[in-house]
Amino acid sequence: MLSFILQVLLFSFILDLAVCAIADPTVSSWKLHEKRSHVPAGWTRAQKHHPSASIPLRIALTQSNIQDIEAFLYDVSHPDSHNYGHHWSPAQIAAKFAPSAESIRTVRSWLIESGVEPHRVKLSPTKAWLEVTSTVEEAENLLNAEYHVYDHESGTKHIACDSYHLPEHVIPHVDFVTPTIHFDAKLRKRRQSIRVPISQPGKSGPKTTGKVQDIFHQLGNCDEQITPICLRALYGLWYEPVAAKANGFGIVEYTPGSYLQSDLDMFAKNFSTGLQGVSPTLVSIDGGVIQTSNENFDNNGESDLDLEYGMTLVTKSQNVTLYQVGDIIEDASFNNFLDALDGTYCTYSGGDDPTQDAVYPDNAAGGYKGKEDCGTVQPTNVISTSYAYNEADLSPAYAIRQCNEYAKLGLMGVTFLYSSGDSGVAGDGGVCLNADGSQSTDGKMFNPSFPGTCPYVTAVGATQVSPGQSVWEPENACEQVIYSGGGFSNYFGMPAYQRTAVEEYITAYPISYPKHVYNSTGSRAFPDISANGANYVTAVDGAFIFIYGTSASSPVVGAILTMVNDARIARGKSPIGFINPAIYSTGFVGGFNDVTNGTNPGCGTLGFNATTGWDPVTGLGTPNFPSLLSKWLVL
Ligand SMILES: *[C@@H]1O[C@H](CO)[C@@H](O)[C@H](O)[C@H]1NC(C)=O
Ligand SMILES: *[C@@H]1O[C@H](CO)[C@@H](O)[C@H](O)[C@H]1NC(C)=O
Ligand SMILES: *[C@@H]1O[C@H](CO)[C@@H](O)[C@H](O)[C@H]1NC(C)=O
Ligand SMILES: *[C@@H]1O[C@H](CO)[C@@H](O)[C@H](O)[C@H]1NC(C)=O
Ligand SMILES: *[C@@H]1O[C@H](CO)[C@@H](O)[C@H](O)[C@H]1NC(C)=O
């Protein structure tokens, strides 16, 4: 079968050559570069695309030295490294990873030898993309692909192919080509439907259980109500920050998600000192606005939760930066945020897929008409995001490229925290994977979340104080309303920092599920750590309600790590940056409260068990602030 396919490919290659009448091309056999297994739900294939129609081909060049990024990152992040904390400047990063002259030359020569006139091959300003406006016929010949028009039930049309090929010698120089297999046409409100704030009601059901009747606000009731004092007691966070000037804690929200000042004030009145009337420092990205025209739990729950707890736990002495991303019309993606932090990642410069990520200026009525934010924003030392995709929502190439960007920001000294998901081993909305890669509620395979599976972020799962227990007893995996997201990636291999911990888990507690149910090939395991995610008393739209989710866990961990940075900076040390190589190292044993009870069900299973040591439910456990502080102060 395989050789049959190869013969067909070779045959069509020879035909292409005949059609294009090219003299003596660089001979190298063709290889499949990317292939899509199924047409996503809602789409149907219509006619073949017209041969003379125009296609804006964009070829993403591989970044040079990217294969060494893990080693570079460990060099500045591993506690045993002499260079621990010696983070890189943005200029050093840009220089190290820019596509090589060889990549540009190889891809350009292939295009020209294939009959594209040299003046049509355009290199993007930062030398990361080659662009050719071609006809469908020409693109099909170049890529050994067949373009079809696809119709979405909403009426949107999209041009795509099922697979495409490149000459073998070109493959190492190309990340991916657009438009090709990526089913990323912009649908109205589509992004919201796949990248939901984790604490909000997803397809899986509500994440709030409604109003709080009487607030106890005391340590004796943390099994029923989580308030800031419960978290301080659980994690030993009795700390007054000192070096506020140089430290930053960023929380990312995506419009129309917005906080209400009246909610922050209501929370502050009962649970914080000196924070009434205080707002986070707003950094608006791509027209990000604090909208107040549409007040409801969906729009305010996530932002209110993140900011009320984030700001309270770092106290009034430490500013919290709010990265508010995207205008009210178009919304935005993680890539839009990353573009703002790193100019080298921007559209036309290497990172974005213009059909997946929001395009600014936004031409729609009421859209943000300013320029896209591109390298305009300074990252804070710690950045917490409580939104996520299912890994399977994105193509591997897209996810890998974004993941590498987190590594670059880690090299700069930024700690990236992402919630690990609220549906246990299932994906957001309780959907699981089918054998063909599609997602449905009756799928049988575990469905990990992204960016939590990116080895260069720290994924945060959820725990609870179980009913009848106190803050002085060990927490358990969260089993109220939500289940902690965890498991094994389908896109990313296992990073060295977690190998020992994960292998210990697999050896001590052999996983009973058939190998096809979860990825058993030694891939990135998550979450890394966890924190409480149940019964958060939160002021939303003028009332105190309960919220559940890893959405809460991530900003809480962010606040704790920000306090570690505060102490380090006060002693003239660098921020902690990418923490994973440190937290899994032997020196950090005791830095986390091990969580050994509870599961994260999903996909018709009980999921995994929280156990002694690292586990795919609660990771290494919850932060023990005094212990972490002492460990990080000697590095
Ligand atoms: C806020 O705190 C006050 C004083 O401790 C208390 O009387 C009030 O009930 C609390 N607010 C709510 C909504 O419980
Ligand atoms: C904190 O934020 C306020 C208001 O945005 C600003 O005036 C102040 O300079 C900030 N403080 C620090 C220490 O960055
Ligand atoms: C384990 O978790 C369950 C569910 O939260 C709880 O009922 C039980 O008491 C826990 N066991 C221990 C030993 O904490
Ligand atoms: C399992 O993960 C690896 C990456 O570690 C990946 O190459 C492989 O395709 C994944 N398997 C499945 C069935 O998705
Ligand atoms: C979880 O623990 C239960 C009870 O000990 C065991 O039967 C089950 O196989 C474990 N599940 C996994 C995935 O390890």
Image (cartoon, helix red, strand yellow):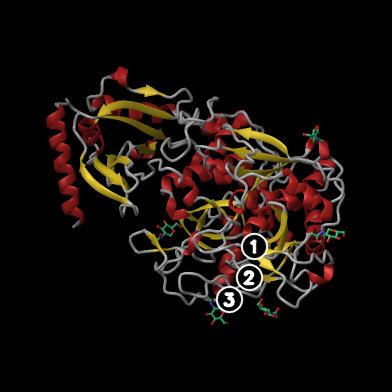
- Mark before the other along the chain sequence, 3 or 2: 2
Q: Secondary structure at mark 2?
A: loop
Tag 2: amino acid: Gln
- Report which residue position mark 3 lands on: 508
- Report which residue position mark 1 lands on: 548
Gap in angstroms between the C-alphas marked 1 and 2: 8 Å
Label 1 residue near ligand 3, CB within 8 Å: no
- Horizontal relation, residue 175 to residue 340: left or right: left
Decide: marks 1, 2 in contact (CB < 8 A)? Answer: yes
- Mark before the other along the chain sequence, 1 or 3: 3
Q: Can the viewer see residue 345 in this picture?
A: yes
Q: Which mark is residue 480?
A: 2
Q: Which residue is rendered at x = 40% and y = 43% of the image? A: 187
Q: Secondary structure at mark 3?
A: helix
- Which sits in the foreground, 318 or 43? 43
Determine whether 4 is above or below 517 in the image. Answer: above
- Horizontal relation, residue 319 to residue 547: left or right: right
